[in-house]
Image: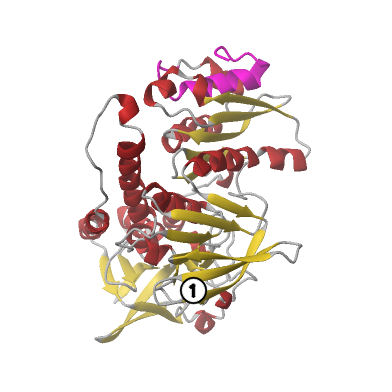
């Protein structure tokens, strides 16, 4: 079967690339290794984790906050099996939505392992045999997998990754989370809200190492209120597994200090690696870089003409929305258009509570680059809307160029900042100044007023409400 475009991988990058290619009149095939479409994000990542984050937050509010709102309840219990069932239903509905979109856009779906026979021919293998697809263009969108070094003894039972954590149907008494990044903190907060004693072991001296340092410090304050204990500047030297528990050996960096942490589960969340296993890239003489990524040019085309790669298998942040943008870019480039992505303006979000969201450069990056800047910061506790909802943790920080006043970065910790950040993204897309942001009328009372106030502080240190 001949196609204009064959996409390998049906995660957000892959299925969006397929849809956009079909919209542009191309005959498209989508190859997926697993039985359901949607990749890591829809099946064992973004969507199921957010379902559990919301469920656990509802429980936490009922137990710890309803009374202060004047809402009296009886004994509140967690039905973990029901919580997992609801999560699975959300995943199923979302994946079925992708099935519908494939049919709607007349995209042929092949389930099986996709591998290169040549740059123009893809073999799809499953339990029923093998078929070969011919393609003018191929887009690799095979995503990533958790990094699980041998030292941890990853067994999917006591030593687990986010994939297995999303299936735990009984609340653990204790959990050790290895890694203070986005995935570990999100899942750690889920179980901490449900009553699990959570210890986070992070090799670096801070959490959220890729984000503005103020954000990590502020979030850690909030997570400590949930009872999460942090061991920063510590590494794991091994894990001893028993039938129903494990012991995690921990060492403080630069010292001989070692100790053990008891846990029902050790959740390994130290990062993800590009997943190119089984692609048979050697068949087209395509090599990986030192981090296992597929090298690409500015059009996301590999060294092999006509073969493109997007998402987690190429350089840049491993984010679903980044992969989607790249999928659209490649589809439009193949169709002869001239698309563009500003990678500086791809926002990052942590879906704990409070949430963390950021776009642009951090204060540390500006200092390292010797870029003159002004910082304006406004706390949510000074907002009437935050006091009304009892969501007073966090702040908004606006970084503006010291000479031109152009917004260079916006960093937030607080309620619903995953949505609020888009105001900053939109304004920065048009190279707005902090004064532009400050002069926009923001509705009162809302969380977005913190953005206006932080912009006022960055413009001329003239925030109104603090």
Instruction: Give the x, y percent position of residue 409.
Output: 61, 35
Exactly how many numbered labels are in the figure?
A: 1
Decide if residue 291 is in sight here: yes
- Residue 61 lies in quadrant: top left
Q: Which residues are magenta?
A: 442-466
Its colouring scheme is: secondary structure
The reply, left or right, for residue 170 in relation to residue 365 is: left
Judge by depth and name the residue closer to the eye, 285 or 407: 407
User: Which quadrant does the C terminus fall into?
Assistant: top right
Judge by depth and name the residue closer to the eye, 297 or 205: 205
Vertical placement of residue 184 versus 146, above or below: above
Instruction: Give the x, y percent position of residue 381.
Output: 50, 23
Vertical placement of residue 216 versus 151, above or below: above
**What residue is shown at x 51% (from left), y 59% (from top)?**
177
Q: Callout 1: few (<14), some (14-19), or many (20+) C-alpha neighbours within 10 Å?
A: many
Mark 1 residue element: loop
**What residue is shown at x 31% (from left), y 31% (from top)?**
66
Vertical placement of residue 130 versus 290, above or below: below
Residue 444 part of the magenta segment: yes
- Residue 464 lies in quadrant: top right
Instruction: Give the x, y percent position of residue 172.
Output: 38, 60
Instruction: Give the x, y percent position of residue 145.
Output: 47, 68
**What residue is shown at x 24% (from left), y 59% (from top)?**
81
Q: Which residue lies under the disc numbered 1?
A: 276
Vertical placement of residue 450 versus 317, above or below: above
């Amino acid at each position: 079967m001949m196609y204009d475009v064959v996409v390998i991988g049906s995660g957000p990058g892959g299925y969006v690339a397929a849809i956009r290619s079909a919209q542009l009149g191309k005959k498209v095939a989508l190859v997926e290794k697993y039985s359901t479409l949607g990749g890591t994000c829809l099946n064992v990542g973004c969507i199921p984790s957010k379902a559990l984050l919301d469920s656990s937050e509802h429980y936490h509010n009922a137990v710890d906050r309803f009374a202060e709102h004047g809402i009296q309840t009886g004994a509140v219990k967690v039905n973990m099996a029901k919580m997992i069932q609801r999560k699975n239903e959300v995943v199923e509905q979302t994946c079925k939505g992708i099935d519908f979109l494939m049919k709607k856009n007349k995209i042929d779906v092949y389930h099986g392992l996709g591998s290169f026979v040549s740059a123009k021919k893809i073999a799809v293998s499953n339990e029923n045999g093998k078929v070969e697809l011919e393609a003018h263009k191929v887009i690799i969108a095979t995503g990533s997998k958790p990094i699980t070094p041998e030292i941890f003894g990853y067994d999917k039972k006591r030593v687990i990754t986010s994939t297995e954590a999303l299936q735990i149907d009984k609340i653990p008494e204790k959990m050790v989370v290895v890694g203070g990044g986005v995935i570990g903190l999100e899942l750690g907060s889920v179980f901490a809200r449900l009553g699990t004693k959570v210890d986070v072991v992070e090799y670096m001296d801070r959490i959220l190492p890729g984000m503005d340092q103020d954000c990590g410090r502020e979030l850690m304050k909030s997570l400590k209120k949930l009872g999460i204990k942090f061991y920063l500047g510590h590494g794991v030297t091994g894990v001893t597994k028993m039938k129903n528990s494990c012991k995690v050996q921990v060492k403080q960096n630069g010292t001989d200090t070692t100790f053990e942490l008891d846990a029902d589960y050790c959740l390994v969340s130290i990062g993800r690696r590009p997943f190119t296993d089984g692609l048979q890239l050697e068949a087209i003489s395509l090599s990986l870089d030192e981090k296992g990524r597929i090298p690409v040019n500015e059009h996301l085309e590999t060294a092999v003409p006509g073969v493109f790669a997007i998402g987690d298998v190429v350089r840049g942040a491993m984010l679903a929305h980044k992969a989607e943008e790249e999928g659209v870019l490649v589809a439009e480039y193949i169709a002869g258009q001239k698309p563009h992505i500003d990678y500086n303006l791809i926002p990052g979000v942590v879906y704990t509570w409070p949430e963390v969201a950021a776009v642009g450069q951090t204060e540390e990056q500006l200092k390292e680059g010797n870029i003159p800047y002004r910082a304006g910061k406004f706390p949510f506790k000074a907002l009437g809307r935050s006091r009304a909802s009892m969501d007073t943790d966090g702040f908004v920080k606006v970084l503006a160029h010291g000479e031109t006043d152009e917004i260079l970065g916006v960093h937030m910790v607080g309620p619903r900042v995953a949505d609020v950040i888009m105001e900053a993204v939109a304004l920065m897309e048009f190279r707005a100044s902090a004064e532009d942001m400050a002069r926009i009328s923001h509705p009162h009372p809302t969380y977005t007023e913190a953005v206006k106030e932080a912009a006022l502080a960055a413009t001329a240190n003239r925030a109104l409400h603090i």
